[in-house]
Amino acid sequence: MTMTTTRTRWRRVALSGWLVLALCGGAAVTRALASEVRTPSRTLSAEERILLGRAAAQAEPHWRRRSMHSFPGDSWSQDDDFGASERGWVMQEARRRDVPVTEVFDAIDTELRSGPVTPPRKATASPCKPRPFYD
C-alpha cells in the first residue's frame, strides 16, 4: 500500500465519521423539534396548597429520620438524601394532581415559612463542603 492510498482511505473513514455524526445530530434536532411538550392543565387552589404543605410537613420527620439513619454524622449527605426524598414526593404529587412541580414546592415553602421552624424541620441547607475522605 502506498502512502497516497492510506491517506485516501483515512480521509474516507474520517468523512464517514463526520457524516454519521451529522446524521445523528440531524435526527436529534428533528426529534426535539417534533416532540410535544405537555403542560400541566391546572394550578393548585388555596385549599390544596395548604393541604399539600401540611402533608409534606407530616412526612418530613420520617424523611429526616431515614436520612439520619442512612448517613449518620454527615449532615450534608443527610440534607441531600432528604432533598431526594422530598423531590420524589413532590414529583408524584405534581403528576397525580396534574400541576407544575413548582406549584407543589411553593406550597411546601409557604407552609414552612408560615410560622417558626422547629426541629427536625429546617429552612436552611448544610454548607457544601468536600468530605475529608472518600471510600
Image (cartoon, rainbow, N blue to C red):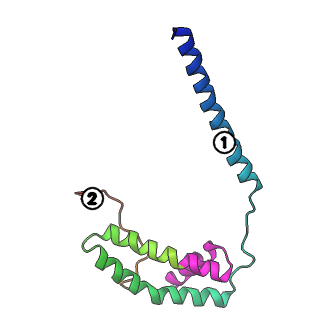
Separation of residues labelled 1 and 2 (CA atoms): 39 Å
Residue at figure coordinates x 77%, y 55% from the top left: 34
Position of the C terminus, as image quadrant, is bottom left
Measured along the vertical axis of the image, is residue 89 above or below residue 35?
below
Q: Which mark is residue 25?
A: 1
- Marker disc for residue 131: 2
Magenta run includes residue 24: no
Q: Amino acid at mark 2?
A: Arg
Front-lying residue, 83 or 114 = 83
Residue 20 location, x and y as percent?
A: 64, 36
**Residue 91 can be seen in this image:** yes
User: In percent of the image, x 52 and y 89: which residue is there?
Assistant: 55
User: Which residues lie in the magenta part?
Assistant: 90-117
| Residue plotted at (46% across, 90% down) | 58
Mark 1 burial class by Cα count in 10 Å: few <14, some 14-19, many 20+: few
Q: Is residue 29 left or right of residue 104?
A: right
Residue 43 spot, x, y in % from top left: 71, 79
Whether the residues at callouts 1 and 2 have beta carbons within 8 Å, the answer is no
109 falls in the magenta region: yes
